[in-house]
Amino acid sequence: MTSTDNKALVDTYFRHFTAGRYDEALDMLAPDATVWICGKPDRFSLGGVRSKAQFSEQVRGVTNAVPKGLTLHPTKLIAEGEWVVAETDVSGISANGRTYENKYVFIFEIKNGRFKTLKEYLDTMHAKETFLD
């Protein structure tokens, strides 16, 4: 796949996620994919490394934490070979009525048209305060 194809794949992932089509988004991960979310798990329970199955379960919790879903708006996509970096604005309203507006950097490694690894960098304090406190 070309860098342009890989950027389109990442954009599709964001569109699925924003539309609440979580199954379609999760199907874009390879069966042996790993997802790393920044943060120490003992301080930020969403942080750490997850298998695809573990990440899938975590994503399904989004519907409880953000009933109307999250909007993922990539502001910059940079691709080189199998890698895509996406600077992304993420927003939503939590179940407790708090506004969530965060900036993320996602790093995708793509193999055979699917995500092999995914890394998420974000303001963990804001996410914790909005969804977990």
Image: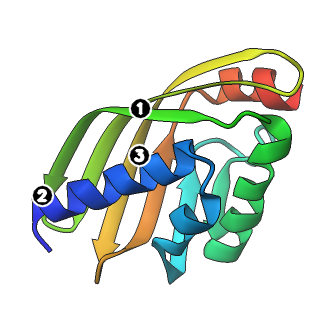
Left or right? Give the position of 86 relative to 129.
Answer: left
Name the residue: 80% across, 36% down: 67
Q: Which of 66 and 79 lies nearest the eye of the viewer?
A: 66
Which of labels 3 and 2 is toward the front?
2
**Quadrant placement of the N terminus:** bottom left
**Pointer 3 or 2: first along the chain:** 2
Q: Is residue 31 above or below residue 77?
A: below
Question: Mark 1: few, some, or many residues within 10 Å (few <14, many ≥20)?
Answer: some
User: Is disc 3 surrounded by few (<14), some (14 to 19) or many (20+) residues within 10 Å?
Assistant: many
Q: Is residue 93 left or right of residue 42?
A: left
Q: Quadrant of residue 132?
A: top right
Q: In percent of the image, x 51 and y 76: which residue is there?
A: 33
Q: Amino acid at mark 2?
A: Thr
Instruction: Please say if 47 is above or below 67.
Output: below
Please identify the quarter of the rendering in which residue 88 is found: top left
Q: Position of residue 105 (x, y in %)?
A: 40, 38
Q: CA distance from mark 3 to mark 1?
A: 12 Å
Task: Check disc 3 and report its element: helix, strand or loop.
Answer: strand
Q: Residues within 10 Å of mark 2 (few under 14, many from 20)?
A: some
Q: Label 2 belongs to which residue? A: 4
- N-terminal of the pair, mark 3 or mark 1, is 1
Query: Circles 1 and 2: CB distance less than 8 Å?
Result: no
Q: How many marks?
A: 3
* Percent position of residue 27, x then y: 53, 74
Q: CA distance from mark 1 to mark 2?
A: 18 Å
Q: Which residue is mark 3?
A: 106
User: Mark 1 sits on what residue?
Assistant: 73
Which corner quadrant holds the C terminus?
A: top right
